[in-house]
Amino acid sequence: MESIKEQAQSLNDDRMAAERNKVLDWLSALRHEQKQHNVRMPRVYGTGEWLLQNIRHKRWRDEQKLGDNVSCCDGIPGSRKSMLTSLVIDQVTDTIIHQNKAIVHFYFDHREHDEQSAGDMFARLLKQLLLHKSELPASVIQLYQRLASQLRDS
């Protein structure tokens, strides 16, 4: 049987988790894991192996300097950029899984034009970074509370 103290701690943990989820959903309702899964699904085994074996890609993947490990894939719609990008994301995620690192990504999708402002992109990237933290930074919580109260007051 749980003591009163344990029950109170459990309720507090639940409240903190709910508040964390509210803040993360406020940043972006998009579930980036689901988007990555949807892009990955049609991929056939062996797709993009040429990219993963490319020396420039390997050099980029293994680069440790902050700022040198950003990659962007651009081209015409339908050229399978997202498919290749999902492959790279999976590969890099597999290599950093046990390190104190995070990989964040954003797919520009012509079908979601209204949801791709610079603010949306940065909010989605920030959310992905915050998902890797056990606690949200106080500054993010304060910003959420300030903006949420402004919306209620207007």
Image (cartoon, grey):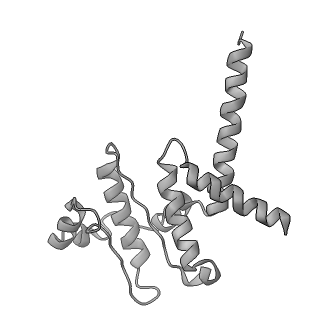
Instruction: Indicate whether 8 appears above or below 83.
Output: above
Classify the position of the C terminus by image quarter.
bottom right
Q: Position of residue 130 (x, y in %)?
A: 51, 53
Q: Look at the image and tell me in which quarter the N terminus lies.
A: top right
Q: Residue 70's image quarter?
A: bottom left
Query: Which residue is more in the foreground, 116 or 74?
Result: 116
In the image, 44 versus 136, the foreground residue is 136
Residue found 55% across the figure and 84% down from its top: 110
- Residue occupying image coordinates x 22% and y 70%: 57
In the image, farthest residue toward the bottom: 76
In the image: residue 35, left or right of residue 87: right
Give me the residue at 42% from left, 90% from top: 76
Q: Position of residue 143 (x, y in %)?
A: 63, 59
Residue occupying the point 22% across, 62% down? 65
x then y, percent, for residue 54: 18, 71
Relative side of 47 to 40, left or right? left
- In the rendered structure, the answer to whether residue 60 lies left or right of residue 71 reads left
Q: Quadrant of residue 53?
A: bottom left
